[in-house]
Amino acid sequence: MQKRYLSLWFKQLLTDQLAIANPSLNEAPLVIAIKERGRQSVKCYNNFALKQGIKPGMSIADVKALVPDVVVEDDEEGTERHLLKDLAEWCIRFSPIVAIDEPDGLLIDLTGCCHLWQGEVPYLRELLTRLRKKGYQVRGAIADTAGAAWAIARYGKEKAIIASGEHYHAVLSLPPVALRLENNLVQRLHKLGLHRIENFIDIPRSVLRRRFGEALLLRIAQAMGKAEEFLKPIYIPEPYTERLPCLEPVRTAEAIEIAIQKLLEALCGRLQKQGMGLRKAVLACYRIDGKVVSVCIGTHKSTHHIQHLYQLLKMRIVNIEPALGIELFVLEASGIEPVELLQQPIWTSSHESDEQLLAEVLDRIALRAGKNAIQRYLPQAHYWPERSIKKVNSLEEKPTIPWPTDKPRPTHLLAVPQPVLVSAPIPDYPPILFVYKGKRHDIKKADGPERIEREWWIESGEHRDYYVVEDETGKRYWLFRSGHYAEERSEWFIHGFFA
Amino acid sequence: MATGATKRNIISRLKEDILRLEGFKSPATGKEVSFGLEMLENAFPYGVFPSSAVHEFLCDEEEDTAATNGFLAVLLSILMQNGRSCIWISPFPQVFPPALKNYGIHPDRIIFIQLRRDRDILWAMEEALKCSALAAVIAELQNLTFAQSRRLQLAVENNRITGFVLRKDSKKITTTACVARWRISPLPSFSEKGLPGVGFPQWQVELLKVKNGQPSVWKATHTPEGLTVKSTEKSNTLLPDSLTVKTGT
């Protein structure tokens, strides 16, 4: 497929931006000043200033003498880049591949996008009209190569859309600067009387290389489509992305549901053909007021089950604020994994389909509770109770060591051991009684001690001597003494409850 | 004019119909899990533990909760024999999984979900009860209203999953649509005569309320061989007066 590129040129980006923020500046000559070698000079100006004879590079003192009522604003480093990034993000609704072309333009790869607007002419008209409505002075051109589009957008006098294969003739009459050359190279070409591209484009390459260097040859080749030029898109489109532009902006939940259904049908169809499944997806909704609302879903197992993904996204619709309306939906599969191919079971109660069902219900809960709220526990090779288990998020992970069953462990473990008052008159014997939460428990039966040493290679501190005790009513507790027996100064804690 | 025998026939058939409509399946119609605990199961209609239903457990204090967890673990070990997982929803992580291994469960097959608010827990429980790939769903709640329990019961009826609700606040007790209401409290441990130390755990298992069944009280002992259940003599005196007990059959 023949590639098509669109170049946008914002002639007076900085002054336009100021005028949009403050409409009163539209009526006055406006100049952006930049500090250069100890003096202030003109960087950018609006049409009023142009009419008064202001040129780029003039010093501000001269400007003020020439036009006494000029408004001078200071330049801020990086404003242009910031502005262009915003504009590029806005342009994503026209094509997924939008690159910033510093200092004052954008390059868009619109290959395969125009049919949604019924052709390139309405496409370009729509894009330019909407940008001009926002208040930007913008020119655009479409051609087969990025170089040619750039040249036509800035220096073209006739057509803005160059038909496929015509770009050679279109650039012939343009000045050499239209080839994106460096300043001194352009001056050298003019000195030699090569004022138009047609004057030198057909000169043999070896001659041009000897006289002007490799840079000119590269730029010519790029404009002619003989050298590949790569755009650096602001967002690299995911390979699995589906777009759904709307004829009219939509605002209702039903419409969003329909959009999700359509996007999923297209996306899951592709995924299924390639044996892939989705782990993470982002639905971005481009609103007509220029904002983008996006919602995100995740799954526990890679899947291309339309109904399930639809349910997940449907739960997220409440988070989508349509405001004045949404004009474009983009569903992006940002996490892709091969899906385990299952043989369709004859009996529905197979374990494989069980896993699928379980993963689906957990996906729904995870959407509401957050992914970290769902935990499984696996044994770890530590004796220290707090470290004897580890949390895992995945459903597949299997224990690497068997669960230990040799020592008594409480069914209920306190997250932090609580201090208790005890009466323990005999060293290394269980206490006679203890007080927990203001209630006294007389100990009737006890087991222990079970000494658990602190793992010194992880943390320092006292060991623990654990006792299983039972009080007069039959309630069973797990107590421990921190460190060695020290009569009154021993510290005792309760750490759990036995069944 | 029907005779006495035909009348009794009609009545028993109607009773069966009512049971069927209420979600109880007779052992002949559906394969139910056998618990091997005849004593417990006899309290239920048809002598079968209702495994596709919601049971509620009252536990006020931490000690009661620990005992309830022990009893639940025994039930779960039987319910999870089919290789399925279970979901345990609670506001705080309190259960210590290694201890469950002693009751015959693979603790890694339990999926713990942490949710703070009761309404979130109820929602998650309802979602989980609709998933037929699970063996059981356990939720720790502060309270449960009739409407909420009815919703859970409706969700559970289609999928043959057992739901267990642990209620922390038994003072605000109200009627619920749960099939049974239990209270498990710890009893002094059982040890062989003359042996020192803490023995095998014993619990007082109270079936306070059961649909169409017989409320009763047992003494259950858990040993490595399994759970043994004995009927307690003073069953009626242990039942609180405030609790209305529906005695059917």
Image: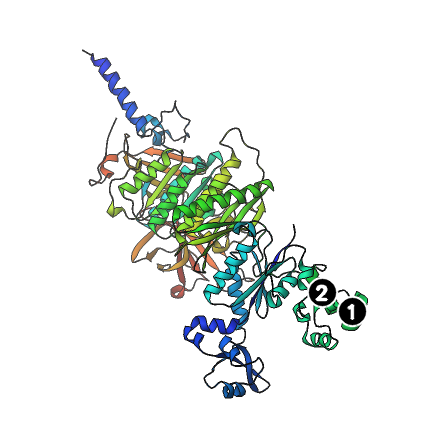
Determine the residue positioned at 53% across, 72% down.
Answer: A12
Q: Residue furthest front?
A: A158
Whether residue B132 is visible: yes
- Horizontal and vertical percent for residue A32? 51, 79
A331 with respect to B47 (left or right): right
Q: Which mark is residue A208?
A: 1
Which of disc 2 and disc 1 is earlier in sequence? 1
- Horizontal and vertical percent for residue A122? 53, 55
A391 with respect to B175 (left or right): right
Amino acid on which disc 1 is placed: Leu
Determine the residue positioned at 34% across, 56% down.
Answer: A434
Q: Is residue B112 above or below residue A200?
A: above
Determine the residue positioned at 41% across, 75% down.
Answer: A24
SS at badge 2: helix
Q: Quadrant of residue B44?
A: top left
Amino acid on which disc 2 is placed: Ile
Residues marked 1 and 2 touching at CB (< 8 Å) = yes
Q: Nearer the viewer, residue A369 or A498?
A: A369
SS at badge 1: helix
Q: Which residue is mark 2?
A: A220
Q: Nearer the viewer, residue A59 or A333?
A: A59
Q: What scheme was used to colour the molecule?
A: rainbow
Whether residue A447 is visible: no
